[in-house]
Image: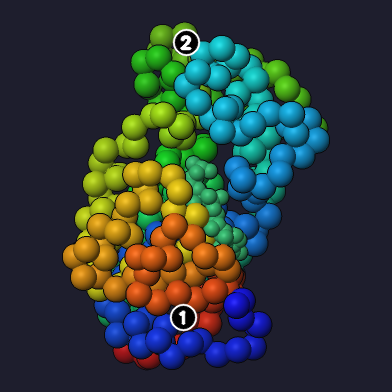
Amino acid sequence: MTQTPDEPVPGRVLELVRRAQRVCVLTGAGMSAESGVPTFRDVQVGLWERFDPAELATPRAWEEDPALVWSWYAWRAALVRGAEPNAGHAAVAEWQRRPGVELSVVTQNVDDLHERAGAQVLAHVHGSLFALRCGVCGSPSAAAYPEVAEPVDHLEPPTCEVCGAAVRPGVVWFGEALPEEEFFAAVQAAQDADLLVVVGTSGLVHPAATVPHLAGARGVPVLEINPQETAVSEAADVVWRTTAAQALPRIVAALPDR
Ligand code: APR
């Protein structure tokens, strides 16, 4: 059951968050939902209705039609630029600034809303939309997405300053390996925590979805914040069926002064 806004923080949640000193917050698309950033699983609108995002976000799509993939990312980048961090992002940043608490943010999101809310992100395990790099030699690129007021379905990607090949979004596509260092840091932070908070992820995309299980296996208490049951729910010790922007500010408000 989803909580209504004025219901208090459940007792079992309070118990976990009040005593936690090393917190790891693992976030997914649901974290940015209340900022209006659509997830892959949300219905595609307008021009993009006829494309399956799970097929656009692949190395194969990029090889076959880079201009199509680039224009889709330009559109997503415009959506993210137009979005603002929500109260959940702000609460995570505030929790991180609390004296006596070490809090690591691990996100599957490729947006920059945690950073724009003032948080430091330990690992973007699926990369970052705005960290452009060459699709061939891997050199970071100073290019940027074009401003697109209207969705356009073919825009030529910029070319690499080093080798001249097409520049691609710095995200992890389906079928690609996760950035090793970031994933390692994420697993370590989750396993070393005394509380793992899992917010807004369906737990369907691996290997990121293994993080709660790996932490749980080490005895780290896992708290899930999600309005729906997910593949992570089973691994969670405590579940709060509400949204990120509802739950996180109330959790931070309930923390003890140290
Ligand atoms: N607050 C919290 N959770 C929410 C909210 C909200 N306001 N709104 C939706 N959710 C939950 C949904 O119930 C769902 O469980 O967020 C989850 C979103 O699931 P996915 O869209 O599968 O997102 P995620 O788990 O991050 O996907 C993993 O797959 O889309 C690719 O690479 C992309 O990083 C992404 C990966």
Q: Is residue 90 in view?
A: no
In the rendering, at what x and y percent does residue 231 appear? 44, 57
At x 61%, y 76%, the residue is 2
> Mark 2 Cα within 10 Å, few/some/many (few <14, many 20+)?
some
Mark 2 residue type: Ala
> In what element is the residue under mark 1?
helix
Q: Is residue 139 in view?
A: yes
Q: Residue furthest top?
A: 164
Find disc 1 in the rendering and name its residue.
252
At x 52%, y 37%, the residue is 130
Give the answer, above or below, for where 102 lies relative to 112. Answer: below
Mark 1 residue type: Val
First of labels 1, 2 by sequence position: 2
In the rendering, at what x and y percent does residue 25 appear? 39, 64
Nearer-the-camera pick, 78 or 7: 7
Quarter of the figure that contains the N terminus? bottom right
> Does the closest atom of ligand 1 sit within 8 Å of the Cβ of label 2?
no
Are the residues tagged 1 and 2 within 8 Å (C-beta)? no
Give the answer, above or below, for where 103 lies relative to 59. Answer: below
The reply, left or right, for residue 29 in relation to residue 222 is right
Find disc 2 in the rendering and name its residue.
165
At x 47%, y 8%, the residue is 164
Asked where in the image residue 30 lies, by quadrant, the reply is: bottom right
